[in-house]
Amino acid sequence: MATNVDSIADSMSVAPASVIKGEWSLPGDKSIAHRAAILCGLAHGESTLRGYPKSEDCLNTLQAVQRLGAEVEVGEVITVRGVGGRYRAAAGALNLGNSGTGLRLLTGVLAGHAHTNELTGDASLRSRPMARIRDPLEQMGATIELLGDGGTAPIRVTGGGLRGIDYDMPMASAQVKSAVLLAGLFAEGATTVMEPYPTRDHTERLLGRMGCPVRVEGHRVSLVGQGAPLKSQSLAIPGDFSSAAFWITIAAATPDAELRLRGVGLNPRRVALMDILRRMGAKIDVRCTDDGWESVGDIHVRGGTLKGTDTGGAEIPNVIDELPLVAVAGALAEGKTTIRDAAELRVKETDRLDAMATNLTAVGVAVEVFEDGMCVQGGASIAGGVAVDSFGDHRIAMAMAVLALRGSSPLTINNVACVDTSYPEFWTDLEHATGKA
Ligand code: S3P
């Protein structure tokens, strides 16, 4: 049978598909996996992580905690023997690849350690803003040197002797919140972060499970660390909603599509894409199968015709990684779709507002870009026979690949190796979704 994707060097040609269907499970959630590796690495005793994603980013974080002294065995199940409270200094720089989560969270942890470490990443990560973690961590007493141009990585962190702070976070960022809370584990007194809008709470949930409860009162999130011993864990990492999102979006926007995705993480701070798609008219049913530490369940999508909608405000942090897909849904819907309050997209792996606007324009979709969002005019036919670029950003590559399934002829997506940083199974899953595998 012909496949739906054709790989040429670092490009993929994705052909239109007449039907989207299937049933499968997603690889593990990356946000949870980074936190599990970092915190189980710090814990007392041996932890096991089932369903840990084998993406480059998540493997880089595991390797970093290993270099900081944890014992890690990578197999079907990952085993982490924790250092029992304090990491040792790593010899040489820790390379977190493409992952802002790995870099920012580990910097927070190492701010609590009385030694010096250097952390770095790939060219994309070295272009992203790091003053947002330096400022609160320095207020707590760490020395954070940003060795790149204009407040970027490499980061040299010299920690220890921290005191808790009350931090009014200027942006809604789970990475910044987590970096401060993780430093707070080692600080004297209480550490509090005030969020402008609630962001994903995987750090809080995992810390609570490991024996360091986090108090949440409205938008205030606090912990009292004082070197509380973290208990080892046996964790099953839920499937990644952000990976499921590609298939949910394209199925919802394709008449006669039908998809069942099993074992997907349903943390309420992650799933706003489903609210947005439902407002657009999508038929999505969810069945929660486990409501423990993190909710997990099955998602059933039936395709149909969508209409445009607006998103902004408090909804944005809960759909932050899926906003390129809101633009894709908008392109396939009737009427206009507007995204506002999403200036954070400009400092992701690439400037995702400009990247999506450039690519949608290339396939014939009318787009207006704002400083904090975009307006997508739906209803045009999606032109094939052209080439678009990922701009080195995995989510842009995958968003354009699913949009190509609704094109008029094959679309070439250049610069797709980045997909492996987060979702190496993506192209196989695309073949599943189009009935080719
Ligand atoms: C993440 C938080 C978000 C998100 C990123 C993962 C996390 O970043 O975009 O992919 O795991 O905490 P910000 O906190 O910078 O918004």
Image: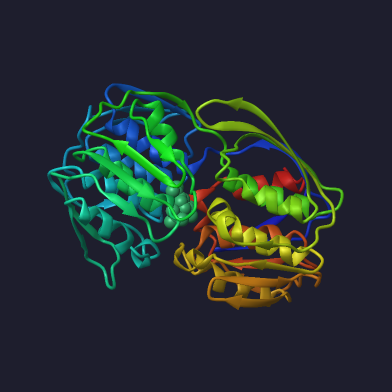
301 left or right of 242? Answer: right
Viewer-proximal residue among 380 and 375: 375
Residue at position x 65%, y 63% from top? 400
* Labels in figure, total: 0
The quadrant in which residue 220 appears is top left
Viewer-proximal residue among 253 and 216: 216
Q: Position of residue 58 (x, y in %)?
A: 42, 44
Residue at position x 41%, y 32% from top? 206
How is the protein colored in the picture? rainbow
258 left or right of 214? Answer: right
The quadrant in which residue 261 appears is top right
Residue furthest out toward the front? 217
The quadrant in which residue 322 appears is bottom right
Does residue 64 show up?
Answer: no
361 versus 219 height, above or below = below
341 left or right of 303? Answer: left
Q: Position of residue 192 (x, y in %)?
A: 32, 45
Q: Position of residue 176 (x, y in %)?
A: 37, 53
322 versus 437 height, above or below = below
Residue at position x 59%, y 43% from top? 241
Q: Considering the image in quadrants, where does the C terminus appear?
A: top right
Does residue 154 show up?
Answer: yes
36 versus 145 height, above or below = above
Q: Position of residue 235 (x, y in %)?
A: 45, 26
